[in-house]
Amino acid sequence: MSYSNTKRALRACEDEIAKEAKAAQEIMEKATKEGRNRTEDENAEIAAHYKALETFQANKRELEDQLEAEEKIEDAVKGLDPERGG
């Protein structure tokens, strides 16, 4: 995966985190607004969103580590190659 691909993957992962969190929040807020406890189905949906959220958060951490390594490598290459800004 190239440097720019990693950045795109990280942004996509962040979008998915926001989407999953928002979906779970909407379910919780709906029950609250209606003044009732959540149903078993709603709790199952929230759990599924939470599991997906955890997965995307783990992926995000991996992508952040990968991006950091790629940036350090790019900086090192620039320092060695005068044509690349070093």
Image (tube, rainbow, N blue to C red):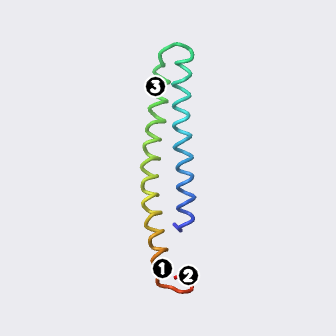
80 over 32 or under it: above or below:
below
Q: Nearer the viewer, residue 56 or 64?
A: 64
List the residue tagged with mark 3: 43
Three-letter amino acid code at the position of disc 1:
Val
Q: Left of 39 or right of it: where is 19?
A: right
Question: Tags 3 and 2 in contact by the CB under 8 Å rule?
Answer: no
Badge 2 or badge 1: first in the primary sequence: 1
> Percent position (x, y) of residue 69?
43, 67
- Residue located at (56% from left, 21% from top): 30
User: Circle 2 sits in a helix, a strand or a loop, which is it?
Assistant: helix
- Residue located at (53% from left, 38% from top): 20
Three-letter amino acid code at the position of disc 2:
Arg
Question: Tags 2 and 1 in contact by the CB under 8 Å rule?
Answer: yes
Q: Residues within 10 Å of mark 2 (few under 14, many from 20)?
A: few
68 over 57 or under it: above or below:
below
User: Circle 1 sits in a helix, a strand or a loop, which is it?
Assistant: helix
List the residue tagged with mark 2: 84
63 over 77 or under it: above or below:
above
Q: Residues within 10 Å of mark 3 (few under 14, many from 20)?
A: some
User: Circle 3 sits in a helix, a strand or a loop, which is it?
Assistant: helix
Give the Cα separation between the discs numbered 3 and 2: 54 Å
- Considering every residue shown, the one lying at the far bottom of the view is 82
39 over 62 or under it: above or below:
above
Tell me the number on the disc at residue 37: none
Give the Cα separation between the discs numbered 2 and 1: 8 Å
Residue 29: name its quadrant: top right
- Residue located at (47% from left, 63% from top): 67
List the residue tagged with mark 1: 77
Three-letter amino acid code at the position of disc 3:
Asn
> Percent position (x, y) of residue 6?
52, 62
Q: Nearer the viewer, mark 3 or mark 2?
A: 2
Badge 3 or badge 1: first in the primary sequence: 3
